[in-house]
Image (cartoon, grey):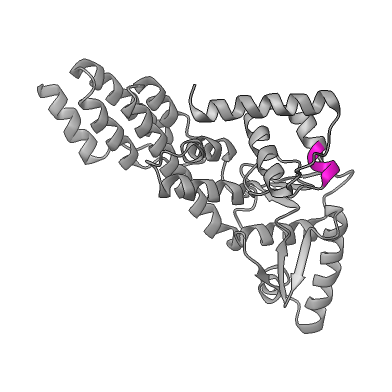
Amino acid sequence: MDRREEFLDTLAAALATGRRGGHFNCMLWLPKVMAYLCAEALVAGIETEYVERLIKKRGLLPGSPDVASWPWPVKIYTLGRFSLVIDDVPVAFARKAPKKPIALLKFIVAAGDRPVPITRALDALWPDEEGDAAQKSFQITLHRLRKLLQHADALQLQQGRLSLNAALCWVDSWAFERLAVYATAAPDSPHEDAKEAPARALALYDGNFLSDDLEEPWTLSLRERLRARYIRLVGLQASRLIENGDLEAAIDSTSEVSQPTILPKSSTSASCAATSSSLRPAEALAVYHRLRRTLAITLGVPPSPATEALFRALQEH
C-alpha cells in the first residue's frame, strides 16, 4: 500500500465514524484543513453524501476551484453543451431561454477566468446601441442574470469589471484549462495529484467550447486554446500508456478523440515511433494501420511524412 492509499483509507475510516455519529464539528476544527479533506474525499468518492452535507452545514469554501464534485451553488457547463446547475438542480426553461442574460454569462466565461470590462461587454452584446441606451440594456440584463443564478453574490461587479465569484461558481472549461496547464507543465512529476491531473482534465472535455455559438467571434479564442490543450493532453496520455507497455489502450485513447476535435498528425507520429522500439515489426505495422485509419476518419488526411518514413522502415525490417 502506497502513502496515498493509506491516506485515503484513513480518511474513509474517519468520515465513516463521523457519519455514523452524526458529527459536524470537532474540537480541533480548522476550516481550510477540513475543506481540503472534503475535497479529497469527493474526488475519491468517499462518503460523498455525508461530505456534501458537512460542506453545506459548515459553509466550507473550496480550497481548489477544480473539484467538479464539490457542491458548488452554481455550475456552468460549456464543453460540448451549455447548461446551468443551480444548487444541484439543472436549470430548465419553461418556454424559451432568456437570450441576453445567457449571452452575458457566456461572454463572461469566454473571457477565461478573469474580470471582464463592462465596455467590452457593451461592444460585443449591444453593438447597435450607444451610450446610455447600451448601459441601460446592460443593467437590465445583469439584473436578470443575477435572478437566473439565484445567488446574489455569484456575480461580482467591481471597478467597472464583471466576474464570477470563484467561491460560488464552477465552470467546466476553466477547470479543464487549469488542470491541463498543470498536467502539461509537470508531466513527469511524482506527485499523485499531478499524475491524476490529465485524466481529470480529459474527463471534463465533452466537446468544443460553446459549440452552439460558433458565429460569436468572442468565443473563438478560448475554443481554439482549449482544443489545443485537449489534443496535447491526449498525446501525453497516449505517451504514458506506451511507456507502460499498454499499446492497445494508447491507440484507443487517440481513437476516442471526439468528432469535432482535431488530432494532429504529430501525435500519431510520436505514438508510432514509440511503438517501433517495443513491438515486433508485424505488431508495429498493425498499430500503424490503426493510426492511419484514425487519421482518415478524423481528418481525412494521410499520416505525416515522419510516420510514413517509419512505416517504410518497418516494411524493410
260, 177: nearer the viewer: 177
User: Measured from the top left, where is residue 244 in percent x and y?
Assistant: 34, 25
User: Measured from the top left, where is residue 16 in percent x and y?
Assistant: 75, 24
In magenta stretch: residue 127: no
Residue displayed at 38% across by 28% down: 241
216 vs 1, left or right, is right
Magenta span = 54-58
- Where is 67 relative to 113, above or below? above
Residue displayed at 53% across by 46% down: 179
The rendered magenta stretch, by its main secondary structure, is classed as helix
**Residue 92 makes an appearance in the image:** no
Q: Quadrant of the C terminus?
A: top left
User: Measured from the top left, where is residue 86 in percent x and y?
Assistant: 81, 45
**Residue 268 makes an appearance in the image:** yes
Residue displayed at 63% across by 27% down: 10
User: Measured from the top left, where is residue 251 in percent x and y?
Assistant: 38, 26
- Where is 221 relative to 291, above or below? below
Which residue is at the far left?
316
236, 226: nearer the viewer: 236
Residue 254 picture quarter: top left
Residue 275 picture quarter: top left
257, 95: nearer the viewer: 257
Residue displayed at 13% across by 28% down: 313
188 vs 131, left or right, is left
Residue 277 picture quarter: top left
